Image (spheres, rainbow, N blue to C red):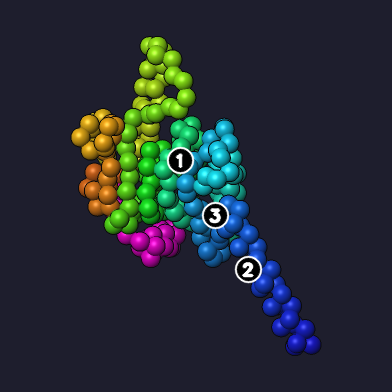
Amino acid sequence: MMEDTQRQESEEKQEAEESQREAIRETGEVALSHRIHLLSVIGEIEGHECLSANSKTTKYEHVLPRLAAIEDSPEIEGLLILLNTVGGDVEAGLAIAEMIASLSKPTVSLVLGGSHSIGVPIAVSTDYSFIVKTGTMVIHPVRMNGTVIGAPQTYDYFKQMQDRILGFISEHSRATRARLEELMLDTGILTKDLGTILVGGDAVEEGLIDAVGGISDALGKLYEMIEGR
C-alpha cells in the first residue's frame, strides 16, 4: 500500500515537473511557488505582425491573457517580471505595460541584459523595479520600419506616440517628462542616432528604475510587499 502511494506521488511529481518545463519552453513563464508567478519578456515584443521564426519574441496575445489570469487567480499573490528585450511593437508594448500597471497584486520587475525602447515602459510599470549592474536601457524617439510618407500627419502621429510613451514612463517612475525628452533627443551618445543608453546605476540616478539589484533582491522585495498586504 505504501509502495503504491510513493509511486503515485513520484508520478505526480514527474508530471508537475514536465508541465513546468513545457510552460517555460512555450511561454517563458513558471509559477515559482503558490505565491509568485514569473513572467519573462525577452527578445523582440511582437505585435500584430508575426516576426521571423528565427527571432526570439514575446507575443503580446499570449501575455495579456496570462496577466488577466494572474489577476483572477486566488493562488497567485505576486508577479515577478524578468526583462531582456530590444523593444518592438509600440502598441503591443504599451498594452502590456498598461495591463501590468493595472494589476491589484504586488509586482516587481528586474532588468537583466537590457530593456530597450518600448521595453522601458514595461520595466517601470511594476510597483518596484530593479536593474543589474550591467543591465542597459535605451531611450530613443519612435522609429518605424518600411515606407514612411513624409507628410505633416505622419510626424504628428509619431509625436502622439512619443507623448503616450513619455507620459506613461513619467507617471510610473521618478523621471520627469522634460528629462526624458532630453534623453530621447540626445545626439552625442548613440552613434548616428538620437537617444541615450543608461547602464545599471545610471538608470536609477535618472529615476527610471528604483534600485540596482539581482534576483534575490527582486524576490525579497516582492515577498516583503506580499507580507505587507
Q: Quarter of the image containing the C terminus?
A: bottom left
Residue positioned 26% across, 36% down in the render:
191
Range of magenta residues: 209-229
| Residue under pointer 3 | 28
SS state under label 3: loop
SS state under label 1: helix
> Mark 3 is on which residue type?
Gly
Q: Residues within 10 Å of mark 3 (few under 14, many from 20)?
A: some
Q: Is residue 220 left or right of residue 59?
A: left
Asked where in the image residue 60 lies, by quadrant, the reply is: top right
Q: Is residue 34 left or right of residue 16?
A: left
Residue positioned 55% across, 38% down in the render:
51
Q: CA distance from mark 3 to mark 2?
A: 15 Å
Q: CA distance from mark 2 to mark 1?
A: 30 Å
Q: CA distance from mark 3 to mark 1?
A: 17 Å
Res. 153 in view: yes
> Mark 1 is on which residue type?
Ala
Looking at the image, the residue that sits furthest to the left is 188
Q: Which circle marks residue 97 in the picture? A: 1
Nearest the eye: 49 or 157: 49
| Residue under pointer 2 | 17
Residue positioned 48% across, 34% down in the render:
89
In the image, residue 94 lies at what x, y percent?
46, 35
Earlier residue among tags 3 and 1: 3
In the image, residue 181 lies at what x, y percent?
27, 30
Q: Is residue 205 above or below residue 24?
A: above
